[in-house]
Image (cartoon, rainbow, N blue to C red):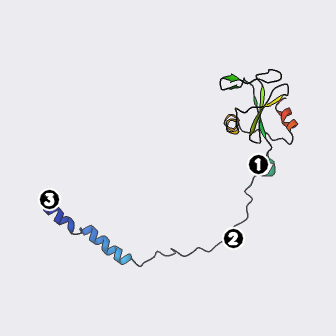
Amino acid sequence: MFYRIRRRAKEPSEAQRQFAELHARLQGQVPPGFGVPAPAEPAGVVDDFLPPELRVPSHDQVDGKMMPWKQPLVLDGEMAMCAECGAYRDWLILSTGGEIWLRCPAGHQQQEPRLDTAWYNRNSGPADATHATFEDCLRHLGH
């Protein structure tokens, strides 16, 4: 029984023979227009950038970023406190030059080595405004 199946499989089927004949007939033919480059039409110049008033500066055009942090800041199981006045909430967190700084409501600033730029980026939301000076940003955030 298996001998007959193998013997039959050695011969091409009718469908295989028809496909081989069709393939031989179409071998040298190319569809019309195939491979012929289309005539190049001049592309119109389109200004696809946003207007200047809607553009956001890139990270290398900004000296730093800052965000408010109203609740206590707990780092490694310890609450961050201002070294000068003891404040422990209502921080402004500043990210500048790869460093993170904390600014208390009284205006004291201290570097926080336990935080990095990746932490800042994970916890900050989208920027709602850009400011020309540090003082303008402080006023915008209510400090």
Callout 3 secondary element: helix
Q: Amino acid at mark 1?
A: Asp
Q: What is the distance, in whole Å, between disc 3 and disc 2 at their CAs?
A: 67 Å
Mark 1 or mark 2: whose residue is earlier in sequence: 2
**Which residue does the image show at 62% across and 74% down from the upper left?**
39
Q: Is residue 105 above or below residue 34?
A: above
Q: Which residue is mark 1?
A: 60
Q: Which residue is mark 3?
A: 2
Numbered tag placed on residue 42 in the rendering: 2
Q: Amino acid at mark 2?
A: Pro
Q: Is residue 68 above or below residue 18?
A: above
Viewer-nearest of discs 1 and 2? 1
Q: Is residue 99 above or below residue 29?
A: above
Q: Position of residue 65 (x, y in %)?
A: 77, 39
> In which quadrant of the rendered view does residue 6 lie?
bottom left
Q: Position of residue 8 (x, y in %)?
A: 18, 65
